[in-house]
């Protein structure tokens, strides 16, 4: 048997260090909002804001450290596909919300008439 050099074009795998950094950052971004909710130290608006920011940061960390999506030429198609999927989902969610809001306005009885 001959030794074959098998390389996956476009497939980049992270190192233990990058996985570990992503894991630690994910834990930190989970513990901070959890601690804020459990301690009730901040107002609801501040807690929700921190939760949203931590959630968005968590998504970015997952994409970069675990899915290896970055600006390198190998990942360009994956990033493009991801952005396209996000746009389609946003259109579907916004369109559905608009339709539901419109139908809600049509089905509610007139108050006082």
Image (cartoon, rainbow, N blue to C red):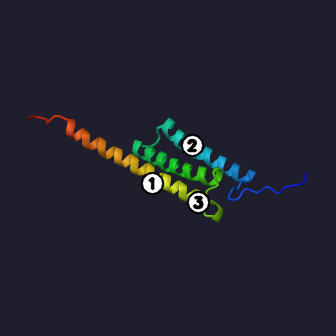
2 or 3: mark nearer the eye: 3
* Mark sitting on residue 30: 2
Viewer-nearest of discs 1 and 2: 1
Q: Residues within 10 Å of mark 2 (few under 14, many from 20)?
A: some
* Residue 107 at x, y percent in the picture: 21, 36
Badge 1 marks a residue whose secondary structure is helix
Please tell me in which quadrant of the rendered image residue 80 appears. Answer: bottom right
> What is the secondary structure assignment of the residue under circle 3?
helix
Left or right, residue 70 beside residue 45: right
Q: Which mark is residue 1?
A: none
Instruction: Say which label, 2 or 3, has the lower sequence index.
Output: 2
Q: Secondary structure at mark 2?
A: helix
Q: Residues within 10 Å of mark 3 (few under 14, many from 20)?
A: some
Tell how many labels. 3
Taking the spot 48% from the left edge, 52% from the top edge, the residue there is: 86
Residue 65 position in % (x across, y down): 64, 53
Front in this rendered view, residue 17 or 9:
9
Q: CA distance from mark 1 to mark 2?
A: 26 Å
In the picture of the structure, the residue carrying the numbered disc 1 is 87
For image coordinates 53% across by 39% down, the residue present is 34
Q: Position of residue 12 (x, y in %)?
A: 70, 56
Closer to the chain start, of discs 1 and 3, is 3
Q: Residue reaching furthest right?
A: 1
Q: Nearer the viewer, residue 72 or 23?
A: 72
Q: Pointer 3: what residue? A: 77
Figure quadrant of residue 2:
bottom right
Residue 73 at x, y percent in the picture: 64, 65
Residue depicted at 35% across the width and 48% down the height = 95
User: Furthest residue to the bottom?
Assistant: 73
């Amino acid at each position: 048997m001959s030794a074959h050099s098998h390389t996956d074009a476009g497939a980049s795998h992270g190192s233990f260090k990058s996985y570990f950094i992503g894991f630690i950052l994910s834990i930190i971004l989970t513990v901070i909002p959890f601690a804020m909710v459990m301690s009730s130290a901040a107002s609801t608006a501040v807690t929700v804001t921190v939760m949203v920011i931590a959630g968005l940061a968590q998504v970015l960390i997952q994409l970069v450290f675990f899915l290896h999506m970055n600006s390198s030429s190998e990942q360009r198609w994956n990033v493009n596909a991801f952005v396209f999927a996000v746009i389609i989902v946003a259109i579907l969610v916004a369109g559905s919300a608009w339709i539901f809001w419109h139908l809600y306005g049509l089905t509610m009885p007139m108050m006082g008439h």
